[in-house]
Image (tube, grey):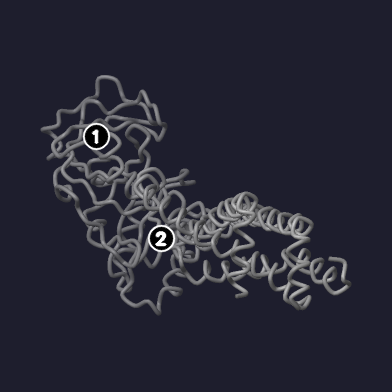
Amino acid sequence: MFIRLATKSLLDRKGSVLVSLLAMSVSIFVLLGVEHIRQQTKENFSNTVSGVDLIVGARTGSVNLLLYSVFRVGNPTNNIRWETYQKVAASSKVDWAIPISLGDSHKGYRVLGTSSDYFKYFSYGDKRLLEFQNGRVFTDLFDVVLGSEVARKLNYRIGDQLVLAHGVAATSFSLHEDRPFEVVGILSPTGTPVDQTLHVSLGGIEAIHIDWQHGVRIPNASAPIDNFDDVDLQPKSITAFMLGLKEKMGTFRVQRGINNYKGEPLLAILPGVALSELWQMMGVLERTLLLVSLLVFLAACLGVSAMLLASIRERRNEIYLLRVIGAPPRFLFFLIELEAFFITLFGVILGSLLLMVALLFSRDYLVETFGLHINVSIFTGNSIYMIALVFIASFIVAALPSCISYLRASKGLD
């Protein structure tokens, strides 16, 4: 009877109730959406690189080293000598090493010079190795392997040829036109910066710069490509390198040894620690988004409270009849609270359904545009906790009209 009475009371005021329900649904959509995307973004962010014990570069800040070596953002303060890389990679404590050479680009996408071990050892997410959507690893000097986004956005296929540009500007007039690369592989999507990267061999990087000096091509110095078999293409320096160690327990010892290396100033960082540090720097934006969604929800709750408060005057006859048949004041209090509960309940259901449908239809767009793999299932521990807080907040804001109804009934003012 109690539930049926509350239902009929809401249906009698369906116009104002519908507006309050829509406002509540939108606020739940925004609140859960921001929280879900925040958590998914953090998870994607922390899964950018895995299985790498140390990243080594020229001495700089740990975040800066992480940004240019993993996210391809920014530039290094200095390069590392090739002899230094070889010495560290040859250590008995090192299982594998991946060299990284940056500095060139193609239509705004960064070019990564590396070795074939990159495709063998580099992993992301839960130690997932890179997979090929089409093609193979580079083997020839002028082979290039494309990230999934590069291939999709620029419409490249296996066998296509492309020209690299000197520098990392989106538009460059310093092109290596005399030595084009052939697409031999396209990687599967990863949701990481790998998707926006072109991968070539270190020898290929050296070959296209063999007649360049200080970022400018030397006039009349082009060497025939056939002669590269007789040219030493071993790099003199690289940007950074990644290490996998044989024993994880010795990670800090190896890190300390690299940081104290006498040959040149180096910095070795733990990717997980640097990722956490970088995420903390983005915490202001994260908290701001959450605050905005909370304010939207608070506005919706106040709207529900105002609607219930305004309805008390309209329901004088209803309250009078309930008092005549013996309904105690507390009955009226809980009746108002139950109505607020129903509005909140249906608002949560409708808002959650709208969010899941929106995520379902925008999932491909988020992957293609932002590299975010968003799970459609929004009911996690955090979201359930937040929904519980929503019901508590709804109970609190409905307390004012409930108390007014209770006091009027108990004083006989109805």
- Residue toward you, 312 or 131: 312
Question: Dividing the picture into quarters, in which one does residue 56 lie?
Answer: bottom left
What residue type is disc 2 on? Answer: Ile
Residue 226 as seen in the image, left or right of residue 175: left
Q: In this picture, is 248 found above or below 107?
A: below
- Residue toward you, 206 or 286: 286
Residue 211 as seen in the image, left or right of residue 276: left
Pointer 2 residue: 55
Name the disc covering residue 265, or none: none
User: Residue visible at 36% across and 26% down?
Assistant: 216
Residue 333 as seen in the image, left or right of residue 147: right
Name the disc covering residue 155, or none: 1
User: Residue visible at 46% across and 54% down?
Assistant: 355
- Helix, strand or loop at label 2? It is strand
User: Residue visible at 24% across and 24% down?
Assistant: 221
Where residue 281 sits: x, y (%)? Answer: 59, 56
Quarter placement of the N terminus: bottom right
Residue 261 seen in the current view: no
- Residue toward you, 105 or 346: 346
- Residue toward you, 181 or 298: 298
Residue 169 seen in the current view: yes
**Circles 2 and 1 in contact, beta carbons < 8 Å:** no
User: Residue visible at 43% across and 55% down?
Assistant: 57
Where residue 371 sits: x, y (%)? Answer: 38, 49
Mark 2 or mark 1, earlier in chain: 2
- Helix, strand or loop at label 1? It is loop
What residue type is disc 1 on? Answer: Asn
Q: In this picture, is 170 found above or below 53?
A: above
Where residue 226 sits: x, y (%)? Answer: 10, 33
Where residue 15 sits: x, y (%)? Answer: 62, 49
